Amino acid sequence: MKKITYFDVIVVGGGHAGAEAAAAAARMGAKTALITHSISKIGEMSCNPAIGGLGKGHLVREIDALDGIMGQSIDKSGIQFRMLNSSRGPAVRGPRAQADRKLYKNSIQKILFNQKNLSIIEETIEDLIIDKNKVCGVITHKLKKMHCRSLVLTTGTFLRGQIRIGKNSYPAGRLGDKSSINLAKKIESLKFSIGRLKTGTPPRIYKQSINFNDLEEQTPDKNPVPFSFINKFIHIPQISCFITHTNNKTHKIIKNNIHLSPMYSGQIMSMGARYCPSIEDKINKFSDKRSHQIFLEPEGLDNNIIYPNGISTSLPENIQENFIRSIKGLENAIIIKPGYAIEYDFVNPQELYHTLETKKIDNLFFAGQINGTTGYEEAAAQGIIAGINSALKLSNNRKFIIDRSDGYIGVLIDDLVTRGTNEPYRMFTSRAEFRLVLRADNADQRLTPLGIKTGCVSRFRENIFNYKINKLKKDFSMVKSKSISPNKLNKLGIPINHDGKKRSAFELLSFNNIGFDDIVKIWPEMGLIDNESREQIIIESQYAGYLKRQRDDIDDFKKDEQLTLPNNLDYKYVGSLSNEIVEKLSLIKPPTLGAASRISGITPAAIIALLRHVRRQKNNKEA
Amino acid sequence: MVKKQDTIYALSTPPGKSAIAVVRISGSKALDYIKKISSSMPTKPNTSTLNKLITKTGDVIDQTITTYYKAPKSFTGEDMVEISMHGGNAVINKFIDVFKKNKKTRLAEPGEFTRRSFENNKLDLTQVEAISDLVNAETEYQRKQAHSQLEGNLTLKTKEIYSELTNVLANIEAMIDFADEELPTDLLNNIKEQIENISNEIYNILSKNSKGRKIREGFIVGIIGKTNTGKSSFINNVSNQEIAIVSNKPGTTRDAIESYIDIRGLPVRFFDTAGIRKHRNTVEKIGIKKSKEISKEADLNLVFLNKSSEIDDFKNVSNPIFIQSKYDIRKKPTTINDITNISSKNNYGIKSLLNRIFHQLSDKNFTENTYISRERHIECLKNTIKYLEKSKQKKNYDVFSEDIRLAIKEISKIYGKTDIENILDIIFSDFCIGK
Ligand SMILES: Nc1nc2c(ncn2[C@@H]2O[C@H](COP(=O)(O)OP(=O)(O)OP(=O)(O)O)[C@@H](O)[C@H]2O)c(=O)[nH]1
Ligand SMILES: [Mg+2]
């Protein structure tokens, strides 16, 4: 007897996108199932053992602001916290932490197991049930039909994944697992436009075979700053990483054997990420660089594996060993697992709406690496958005979209769905045009209110947030209300121009020579303002001019985003658009005039024509 | 609903010399501002008045016909004033100058009037056709403009600056987004040096291409060449008077002689100079030195030759037109394309030479199409400099980069927006990124 089961939301895949999607849907109150082939692998870090970094750290903070699980989990498992760019300005600071793989995974699993409304099921998916371009369930390996309102696929690199080391090549994933092949075939049969990408990993090295004695040490921050806005302290012991370098000998070995690398023997043609080249690529493309740095990253506190970040390779195993042993500190290195390259298919993200629902099949969502991104954080960011929107499908067609001026998550998704990608997409701070406003330190102020409104934020976090916001408001109004004349300031020993202009505490903080301690000297009651508020006040004061300009730009941006283009707009009838532009717009279906203007190859004249057309339609309707 | 926006102005007839020029001002402050500089201003909407425009200092700019359109019954849907004035360059320039100095209004971006009328929902079905024509005219105008800008060297220069700035930004972004990578240690110094060089370049352009100066002082055309080639005879011919001494003795002219000539409305100052040869005495030496200075500053140089082979001696002269005079008595007139034949005795070729001078000067500086956009160029360049100067103050990388982004935004107003992908392309091709 076939048993029929129903869930509001089914999430397939237990990686970082899947975990975040399932948790978000369940928080939204949807009856949710997370289906994974192996429960023990949920939340596993399959690549390098770190969370955050530049741009990525912003994403983690934003996920956390929406009550996601990534930030809390890294706070429980981070073994080396560092605030990157701490001296380069608040907008580009990026929190990063090395993780203890096991602790991280444990934390994710614990949160999911305790999540209300969420069932976790160990199963594999054979097929999707699709009725009139609408997904309504899955068929699992044990031939159970499971129905659902919406389905989120977060299956990573399983589409035609192919691993290559030297001349060897074999399909990725669980070897010989037919069901993953069936699901891949199903997705192919739906005729999404597909591209192929490549990524690589370095060999893993046995920790006790490395001589760290003479290597450069990278120490953790003295005061680790948590990722999550609900945490104030980190309780995990903090340890160092070590840095070593490739040398002449290393380069020689690699050059001499480059023909054995599948990338140079013509076996791999797909596009790898330019910011994450293999060591073969680095040596080949930047031949004048004498050495390349390698971060020796521990995979955990009681773990014997070292991840040498910076030397991903697909050379044959014996060559890997050769060149590894030419490197300082690694002379006796034992390789536990060789590096390899993996090629895989991804779905062109232009097939998706900003909600990450596919345009072809209703109620079907894609999130994570399947959309052409790389990185846990990018995956998790998509996961939370897909999770929220899949749950919103239950209600009267509400949508949850973060736009480019709200957060990095918005930049990420907008880039993907309007422009597509031809290399594994990774977040950078430079992608955010409103970077000064979208800081890691204010992610909660930007996004938690949106999360509360849409229903993905728990009461616990809501209370913490409200408390903080009220405190901030009070503190800001205090520093803006008290003011003092230059005369008095000078008398207090704080030198300032005698221009007769009275200035508020807030304005005074924009002067380089005036710090919060001076302010407290003038107005002792401001000593009560805590560090969290002080940081916000100082940034807003020192960057006031820049922030005002950028907020004005955001207003302009929002105006264009409010001009919506109907989903069923037939671009052929817009007039004065070239065929190429008609094709592009019909494929991508930009939701707003703003989104249309960001598609590559769309001219200003085309935008004017679009605007004109939409206005005409509207007037017709009103008449 | 009409949104409150800046008040903008622009010349809406094609720039250059024409009978009537129309300037439009749109926005909430349009009427107020024009009233301030008017002798008699219509207060009733949709009526026209004969109105003298007067500057603060009391100069009359022109007698105009001024029309006032009250919001929302105007082209843009905002309060608008339309001024028809006489179409001479001097009048228009004076007017634009007065406008530039006031803080209430600003020069419109290309297409901004049309855009506002779109935004204010001014288009009903019957207007669509008419507007469509207008919008098309506008893009056609932009197309032409883009083309002629390509030929101007100011434009080529600004394009160069644009790509240099893009490089600077890419370098800063590399330091921000790839802080953990091994970037070149002298990167920051290089960036600072590049910014210094770029600002100097812009200052240079701004000082050379100040159009206002040209209008006031006229273009400079140097008349240079070896002795006895007929330079003085030429300046006498075109100025219809004997201002320079002519003789068959080489080295007659010792000091530069100036003659102001109006070529079809373009003010041009011809400078006859001492013929160049191995000088015989100090007076002549000073004269020759001056000749060289003039030829360096000149917008155009008429290089007079005795024989065509002399061209090689004048290779370094900027903006040259090579000329052989005395066509009337030459047995074998030159047939080399680059050399123009004239005669100051019988006027052969003089008219067409003056025509050519007119075209070359106006092409380079005031093509009818690039006139206003040049105005915009200068404004963009000034804003670019403003942000570059700001970036030189000591500050965090995030705002340092923002200053450069704003500078690029200003200069790219001429070419369309920058794309972050270009920046990333530069980073990844210049630096080995990826730990
Ligand atoms: N037939 C004829 N003679 C000319 C013409 N132009 C100049 N000449 C004669 O050529 C001689 C030199 O003329 P200038 O005009 O003094 O020459 P220049 O180049 O000013 O000479 P310098 O001042 O000495 O450098 C004079 O005898 C002129 O009369 C012309 O077009 N036709
Ligand atoms: Mg002479």
Image (spheres, coloured by chain):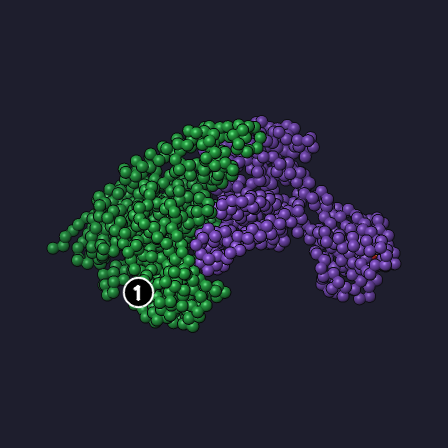
> Residue at coordinates 38% horizontally, 70% vertically from top-left?
A322
Q: As drawn, which residue projects farthest toward the front?
A: A213
Residue A61 x %, y %: 36, 45
> Residue at coordinates 53% horizontally, 36% vertically from top-left?
B6
> Residue at coordinates 50% horizontally, 28% vertically from top-left?
A484
Query: Callout 1: helix, strand or loop?
Result: strand
Q: As drawn, which residue projects farthest toward the left?
A: A1
Which quadrant of the structure image shows residue B228? bottom right
Residue B433 x %, y %: 44, 58
Residue A481 x %, y %: 45, 28
Task: Give me the chain that's purple.
Answer: B
- Seen from the viewer's position, the closer of residues B240 and A140 is A140
| Chain A visual colour | green
Q: Chain for mark 1?
A: A
Q: Tell me: is circle 1 under 8 Å from ligand 1.
A: no
- Seen from the viewer's position, the closer of residues B123 and A156 is A156
In the image: residue A405, left or right of residue A204? right
How many labels, in total?
Answer: 1
Is B26 above or below relative to A244? above
Mark 1, Cα crowd under 10 Å, few <14 / some 14-19 / many 20+, is some
In the image: residue A543, left or right of residue A126? right
- Seen from the viewer's position, the closer of residues A106 and B53 is A106
- Seen from the viewer's position, the closer of residues B300 and B18 is B300
Decide if residue A129 is in sight here.
no
Q: Quadrant of the C terminus of chain B?
A: bottom left
Decide if residue B153 is in sight here.
yes
In the image: residue A93, left or right of residue B322? left
**Three-letter amino acid code at disc 1?**
Ile
Residue under label 1? A336
> Residue at coordinates 30% horizontally, 54% vertically from top-left?
A301
